[in-house]
Image (spheres, coloured by chain):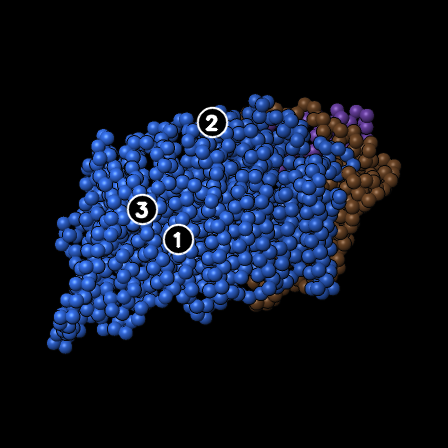
Chain colours: A blue, B purple, C brown
């Protein structure tokens, strides 16, 4: 093994030497530069290998031939080697990225860069406290010079402010060091810790440690003493910002980690609090930020705060080993790679405004990596941050630190607001044609390498983390990777075939593993997946981005069913969320809706994660099996509420629904059925899961409230649907209502109620898929969503007409189709339960449903044809195929409902033996107090109504011969052409009178509530960030004021 | 007594006062330098032991009894490093001010508020 | 005004932090153990009369190497800030400078060699008396400063200065490295790679005089080029 001091020798020696090699030409000096960085990386990688693979124990390296504390020593253990390896490899890639910039400035910038890396390595390695100061100054000064080296005014100003802040920090660092020396008589960190100065009870020792920590907190850029840091991130060359943000903070974090043991619990707590305040505050301020690199600065500082908080908490709860080591590394490496990557991409894009980042779409590879980096920062699977956050939440829950969990999850959610919004701009914001981004192999390849490393590490996490369900995820993720790689090569139809084949294969493999209600959902997810993929054959070209997203979503959905433990469930939930987000945002005007979808989902997901963590704790703290939900011992109502709200964000219950109409209506026409008919059921699945568990504990009150919520959701959804003029929005609101029925039925908590819920889930899947496919295809054909622009299409599109007809009959719940069964079960259920008031609302909303269903078919297919649509043809066969498969399915289950309800009945009986439904063949009967209460004879209804229908139809057909054809009369009077099409459509706004009567129910109260929340966050953000008034002097004042404040806080805590 | 220590802390306070109140960037840097000198004085005073001499083992200090005759050399060594580093930083900051002045022809820190919020 | 009040409050806050230190401070009465070993070992093992020098150059040599690096970085950074192409595009007005008086010119020419020799004396005797590479280098740089002040046409030879700067820096690292090679893995920057010589003479204390000479040369040339850069051609 190579002595680690060679890193110092190489960097310093070559740094000194480089200026005289300038004469030898750029090639020589550049190759020396890279050779040095490569050797340094190789040395550190070699040690890392020794530590990880060979189990090498921690080593000391001495200087000057004497042992510490007389001399300065370096320590190299696993953590040190991880940090220096990360730093040195990033430095090497960064050098590739920056080489053109450096060559423009001249050889001295190479020197500065080498010495900065030297400083970073030294900070990690040294065990001498004064040596930390020296290396901090080396890092600092070389960074100042590098920032200012491009001589732009902004970089100069930023660097100047940085120097002032750094100067103040150094003063306090020196004070801390010298008084610690005074107290302990040594400069060696280990010796100092052994002398435990805080225990000595001397006032000076306490203040000395205060100075030391304070100086490092300033270097860690903690709120509010960090205005200068934002300027630095904004103004420097993004290549350098990336290095500062990633490697610089890594080294200082490690330096702080080394001296942390000097503190006590009060200190650890204070540091954690400062960290979390920084995390939340800078994320809030980030919301208002429009400048890309400054925004990245806010995000960097926020992440740093999170890392600091995790470290403080780690020390508070038993030291950084095991769990906390894992957590901090996972959080660290995500930030480390992702932030460097994003800064570097900013250097390629060269657009100041985040709204102008749409140019990234010109380079799919960069776009892909941008997304990956952002999602890695937010802690989505499969990236390491995901694992870190999960463990952090679980560990904190074990210590009963619920406030901490709340704060961390809140901060993460706020961070998601601006990152996801930004990514939305990148994907969707309009861009001028001639805009281009910088080309250049060096920058691209650096980002590419960084991205590859991120995915490699993520892969290692997925593979080696014992709690991932690898047997399930391995091949799907491989398949998704394949789809990503070939995304720009293969045509859409091949990918479509592959995707359908993949889904079918997985269905084949896993189908017999599912039982009971999981089986029903497996049918919905898999059959739904295949059916909704079929229309994809229409698409020409490559349809870039669609297939990976769809498969991610379906893998997530299946993962929910496969999951045996809470972690797998949560992983699947997140995969599903990511996939569906990317599907939804594909629509033309989807960007804001996709954002709100993502935020609601994420908020829900965090609640679920929190709930799971609590489940783990309050079921005894053993393991994370999903079945633990059944053995929660205390706080069950709270856990149940959290999980329920989490799942309700997905089912869009009233109050949490505002994302749905836009997201579903604006999605592409084959995506709408995916996210509406299929995806919503994931929430239902989760609800069923926790409601089964709720039988073991007392959550009756909450479930009762959920029943009301379901009823209200149903009514509001249907009312809103009736007032829509946009066909797809109408269907979207109808989904909200249908999910309200399901929630209501579940909340009844009886055998027959759950039968209704399962039946509704299955049926909503069928008829909503049918309707969305049919209407979606029409919408694509006519290029408008507005029903008043359609009309009389029955002749042009008879097949679509039949589909919609069957769909609305099934949905409305009139016999003989399946919806009737749903109503029968539901009405039986609430009457038997005695929920008359809620039942009345449900029944009333059932009536309201007729309004919009009639409007749907009437406005689109009946009435006079619009002139411009006279030549429209039937929609594509690829849309019709799945529709007719669904129609057959509806017919079958309408006649033989036991196919769906038979087995599930036995399963439900085992949990809820009251209010049984008794089957005789396909005839179902319900009993009240032992007496026969209702009978549902599906096959006979089918036959009878079928006969009536056929009779009537044939009679109509015979009669229609005698009917007189009426020509369209011209409604354009006196040469005046009405400008707006609405006014000439017979069914536009037909329910205005109902609106007058019931419109108060449809007032946008909930939307207003949420926009009030959003506005408040924005104004808080705008208020707080005024602190950063741009004046370097004010920043010094912040630093000193911050110091005085911490001092008094600690003084009150009794530290001094 | 510890007059030297008081002097050091006073210089620190004066330096910070200058940094907080002066508008001229050069004066702010002078404030920083004063504060640095304060720290250096504090550092030196910490190594002081009454009635002892400099840690140079010449004829004045007998080798055998040196341990009881000299003051603590460590703070002196540290302060040398601190001074050199301080000089380096100050030189760099002043160069930045020169560059800034070239760009905008102003030495007032209030004129460099391009980046905020 | 508000700013002044805030500043006052903050300074008052700082004083409340500082005052307990002053009140609770007590001077050392005896050397800490580490310092004791330095005093004993510095003379015995390293052969240096000046204990501070022994600490700076050998015991805490890594600090000093870092210190040299800091100065080097600052000089490099300043050179980057005032680099040629950056100044050219600003096109400063050439201002004619009045020549210095004959007396000043002659006086400084007379003094310069003496000061130079004094600087060299300081770093050569660093292990024996107060002084050392940094101090000596600073004195040498004053020579250049005086020449700049007296003779407006005086220019330093960048090639030679740059070469000395790099050469002395690299040599310093190499001497440290020789410790690793000649004495073992724990002996980076050990001054005992050379014989310790007779205690108290100029050729003693192993590599310390050599290191201090290199540091003196490096600091002198670095500060000189910093002065040269800062002098610039600014109107």
What numbered label is drawn on residue A897?
A: 3
Q: Give the vertical position of A38 relative to A1056 (above or below).
A: below
Q: Position of residue A184 (x, y in %)?
A: 64, 27
10 Å crowding of disc 1: few (<14), some (14-19), many (20+)? many
State the residue at coordinates (81%, 28%). Answer: B63
Q: In the displayed structure, does residue C158 sit left or right of residue A558?
A: right
Asked whether, in this view, residue A72 is left or right of residue A1048, the answer is right
Q: Say which element carries label 3.
A: loop
Q: Is label 1 or label 2 in front?
A: 1
Position of residue A1022 in the picture relative to residue A1005 (left or right): right
Q: Are marks 2 and 3 on the same chain?
A: yes
Q: Chain of mark 1?
A: A
Judged from the image, the secondary structure of the residue bearing numbered disc 2 is loop
- In this orientation, which residue lies closer to the viewer: A956 or A835? A956
Foreground disc of the pair 2, 3:
3
Distance CA(mark 2)–CA(mark 3) = 42 Å
Q: Residue furthest left?
A: A974
Position in image of residue A688 (x %, y %): 37, 39
Residue identified by numbered label 2? A620
Residue at position x 22%, y 39% in the image: A934
Mark 1, residue position: A528
In the image, which disc is placed on residue A1054?
Answer: none
Identity of the residue drawn at 19% across and 55% down: A948
Label total for image: 3
First reached walking from the N terminus: tag 1 or tag 3: 1
Which of the pair C9/A902 is nearer the observer? A902
**Front of the two marks 1 and 3:** 3
CA–CA distance between discs 1 and 3? 19 Å
Residue B98 shows in the view: no
């Amino acid at each position: 093994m190579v002595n680690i001091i060679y890193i110092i020798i190489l960097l310093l020696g070559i740094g000194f030497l480089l200026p005289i090699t300038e004469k030898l030409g750029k090639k020589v000096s550049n190759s020396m530069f890279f050779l040095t960085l490569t050797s340094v990386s190789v040395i550190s990688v070699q040690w890392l290998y020794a530590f990880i693979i060979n189990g090498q124990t921690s080593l000391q390296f001495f200087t000057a031939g004497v042992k510490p504390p007389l001399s300065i020593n370096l320590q190299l253990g696993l953590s040190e080697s991880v940090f220096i390896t990360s730093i040195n490899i990033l430095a090497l890639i960064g050098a590739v990225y920056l080489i053109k910039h450096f060559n423009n400035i001249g050889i001295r910038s190479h020197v500065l860069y080498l010495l900065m890396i030297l400083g970073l390595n030294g900070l990690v390695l040294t065990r001498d406290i004064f040596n930390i100061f020296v290396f901090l100054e080396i890092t600092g000064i070389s960074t100042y010079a590098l920032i200012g080296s491009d001589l732009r005014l902004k970089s100069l100003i930023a660097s100047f402010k940085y120097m002032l802040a750094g100067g103040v920090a150094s003063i306090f660092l020196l004070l801390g060091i010298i008084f610690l020396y005074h107290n302990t008589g040594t400069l060696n960190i280990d010796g100092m810790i052994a002398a435990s100065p805080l225990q000595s009870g001397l006032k000076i020792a306490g203040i000395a440690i205060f100075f030391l920590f304070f100086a490092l907190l300033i270097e860690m850029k903690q709120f509010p003493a960090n205005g200068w840091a934002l300027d630095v991130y904004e103004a420097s060359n993004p290549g350098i910002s990336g290095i500062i943000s990633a490697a610089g903070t890594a080294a200082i974090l490690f330096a702080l980690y080394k001296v942390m043991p000097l503190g006590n619990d009060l200190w650890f707590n204070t540091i954690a609090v400062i960290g979390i305040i920084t995390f939340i505050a800078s994320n809030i301020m980030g919301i208002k930020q429009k400048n890309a690199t400054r925004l990245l600065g806010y995000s960097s500082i926020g992440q740093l705060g999170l890392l600091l908080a995790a470290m403080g908490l780690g020390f508070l709860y038993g030291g950084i080993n095991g769990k906390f080591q894992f957590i901090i590394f996972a959080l660290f490496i995500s930030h480390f790679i992702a932030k460097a990557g994003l800064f570097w991409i900013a250097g390629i894009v060269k657009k100041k405004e985040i709204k102008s980042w749409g140019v990234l779409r010109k380079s799919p590879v960069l776009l892909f990596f941008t997304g990956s980096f952002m999602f890695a920062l937010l802690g989505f699977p499969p990236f390491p941050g995901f694992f870190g956050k999960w463990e952090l939440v679980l560990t904190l829950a074990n210590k009963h630190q619920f406030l901490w969990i709340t704060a961390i999850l809140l901060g993460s959610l706020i961070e998601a607001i601006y990152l996801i919004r930004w990514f939305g701009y990148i994907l969707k914001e309009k861009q001028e044609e001639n805009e281009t981004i910088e080309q250049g192999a060096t920058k691209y390849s650096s980002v590419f390498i960084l991205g590859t490393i991120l995915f490699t590490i993520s892969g290692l996490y997925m593979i080696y983390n014992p709690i991932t369900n690898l047997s399930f995820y391995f091949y799907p993720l491989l398949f998704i990777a394949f789809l990503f790689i070939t995304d720009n090569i293969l045509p859409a139809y091949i990918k479509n075939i592959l995707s359908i084949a993949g889904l079918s294969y997985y269905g084949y493999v896993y189908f017999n593993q599912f039982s009971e209600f999981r089986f029903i959902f497996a049918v919905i997810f898999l059959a739904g997946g295949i059916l909704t993929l079929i229309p994809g054959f229409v698409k020409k070209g490559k349809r870039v981005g669609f297939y990976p997203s769809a498969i991610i979503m379906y893998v997530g959905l299946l993962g929910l069913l496969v999951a045996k433990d809470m972690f797998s469930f949560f992983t699947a939930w997140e995969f599903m969320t990511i996939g569906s987000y990317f599907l939804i945002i594909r629509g033309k005007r989807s960007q804001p809706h996709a954002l709100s979808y993502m935020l609601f989902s994420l908020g829900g997901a965090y609640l679920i994660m929190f709930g799971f963590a609590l489940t783990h704790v309050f079921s005894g703290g053993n393991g994370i099996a999903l079945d633990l939900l059944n053995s929660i011992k205390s706080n069950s109502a709270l856990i149940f509420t959290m999980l329920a709200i989490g799942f309700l964000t997905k089912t869009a219950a009233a109050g949490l629904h505002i994302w749905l109409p836009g997201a579903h209506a604006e999605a592409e026409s084959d995506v709408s059925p995916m996210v509406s008919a299929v995806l919503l059921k994931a929430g239902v699945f989760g609800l069923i899961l926790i409601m089964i568990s709720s039988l073991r504990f007392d959550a009756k009150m909450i479930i009762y409230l959920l029943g009301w919520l379901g009823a209200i959701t149903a009514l509001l959804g249907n009312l809103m649907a009736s007032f829509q003029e946009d066909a797809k929005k109408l269907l979207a609101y109808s989904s909200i209502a249908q999910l309200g029925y399901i929630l209501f039925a579940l909340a009844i908590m009886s055998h027959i109620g759950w039968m209704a819920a399962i039946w509704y889930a299955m049926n909503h899947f069928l008829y909503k898929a049918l309707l969305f496919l049919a209407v979606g295809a029409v919408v694509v054909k006519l290029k408008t969503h507005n029903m008043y622009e359609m009309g009389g299409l029955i002749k042009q599109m008879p097949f679509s007409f039949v589909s919609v007809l069957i769909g609305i009959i099934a949905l409305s719940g009139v016999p003989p189709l399946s919806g009737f069964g749903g109503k029968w079960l539901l009405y039986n259920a609430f009457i038997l339960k005695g929920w008359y008031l809620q039942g009345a609302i449900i029944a009333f909303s059932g009536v309201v449903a007729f309004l919009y269903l009639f409007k749907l078919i009437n406005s689109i297919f009946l009435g006079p044809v619009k002139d411009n649509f006279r030549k429209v043809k039937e929609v594509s066969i690829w849309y019709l195929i799945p529709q007719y498969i669904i129609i057959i399915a509806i017919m079958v289950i309408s006649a033989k409902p036991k196919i769906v309800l038979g087995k599930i009945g036995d399963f439900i009986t085992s949990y809820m033996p009251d209010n049984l439904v008794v089957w005789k063949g396909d005839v179902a009967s319900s009993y009240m107090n032992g007496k026969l209460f209702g009978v549902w004879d599906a096959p006979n209804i089918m036959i009878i109504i079928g006969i009536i229908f056929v009779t009537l139809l044939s009679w109509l057909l015979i009669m229609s011969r005698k009917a007189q054809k009426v020509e369209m009369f011209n409604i354009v009077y006196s040469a005046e052409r009405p400008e707006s099409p609405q006014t000439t459509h017979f069914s536009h706004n037909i329910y205005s009178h109902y609106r007058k009567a019931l419109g108060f129910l449809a007032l946008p109260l909930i939307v207003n509530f949420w926009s009030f929340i959003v506005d408040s966050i924005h104004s808080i953000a705008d208020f707080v960030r005024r602190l950063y008034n741009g004046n370097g002097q004010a920043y010094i004042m912040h630093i000193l004021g911050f110091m005085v404040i911490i001092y008094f806080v600690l003084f009150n805590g009794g530290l001094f | 007594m510890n007059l030297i220590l008081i002097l050091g802390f006073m210089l620190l306070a004066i330096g910070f006062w200058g940094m907080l109140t002066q508008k001229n960037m050069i004066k702010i840097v002078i404030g920083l330098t004063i504060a640095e000198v304060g720290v250096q004085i504090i550092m030196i005073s910490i190594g002081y032991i009454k009635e002892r001499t400099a840690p140079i083992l010449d004829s004045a200090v007998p080798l055998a009894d040196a341990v009881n005759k000299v003051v603590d050399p460590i703070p002196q060594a540290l302060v040398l490093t601190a001074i050199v580093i301080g000089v380096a930083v100050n030189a760099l900051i002043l160069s930045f001010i020169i560059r800034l002045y070239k760009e905008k022809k102003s030495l007032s820190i209030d004129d460099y508020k391009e980046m905020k919020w | 005004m508000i700013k002044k009040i805030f500043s006052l409050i903050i300074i008052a806050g700082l004083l409340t932090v500082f005052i307990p230190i002053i009140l609770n401070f007590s001077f050392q009465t005896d050397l800490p153990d580490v310092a004791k070993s330095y005093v004993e070992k510095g003379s015995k093992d390293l052969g240096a009369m000046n204990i501070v020098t022994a600490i700076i150059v050998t015991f805490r040599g890594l600090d000093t190497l870092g210190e040299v690096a800091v100065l080097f970085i600052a000089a490099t950074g300043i050179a980057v800030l005032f680099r040629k192409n950056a100044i050219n595009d600003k096109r400063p007005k050439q201002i004619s400078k009045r020549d210095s008086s004959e007396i000043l010119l002659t006086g400084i020419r007379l003094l310069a060699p003496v000061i130079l020799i004094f600087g060299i004396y300081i770093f050569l005797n660093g292990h024996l008396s107060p002084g050392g590479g940094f101090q000596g280098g600073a004195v040498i740089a004053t020579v250049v400063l005086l020449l700049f002040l007296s003779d407006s046409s005086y220019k330093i030879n960048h090639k030679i200065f740059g070469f000395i700067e790099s050469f002395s820096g690299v040599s310093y690292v190499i001497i440290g490295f020789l410790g690793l090679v000649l004495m073992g893995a724990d002996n980076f920057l050990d001054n005992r790679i050379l014989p310790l010589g007779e205690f108290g003479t100029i050729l003693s204390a192993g590599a310390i005089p050599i290191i201090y000479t290199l540091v003196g040369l490096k600091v002198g040339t670095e500060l000189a080029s910093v002065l040269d850069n800062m002098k610039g051609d600014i109107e």
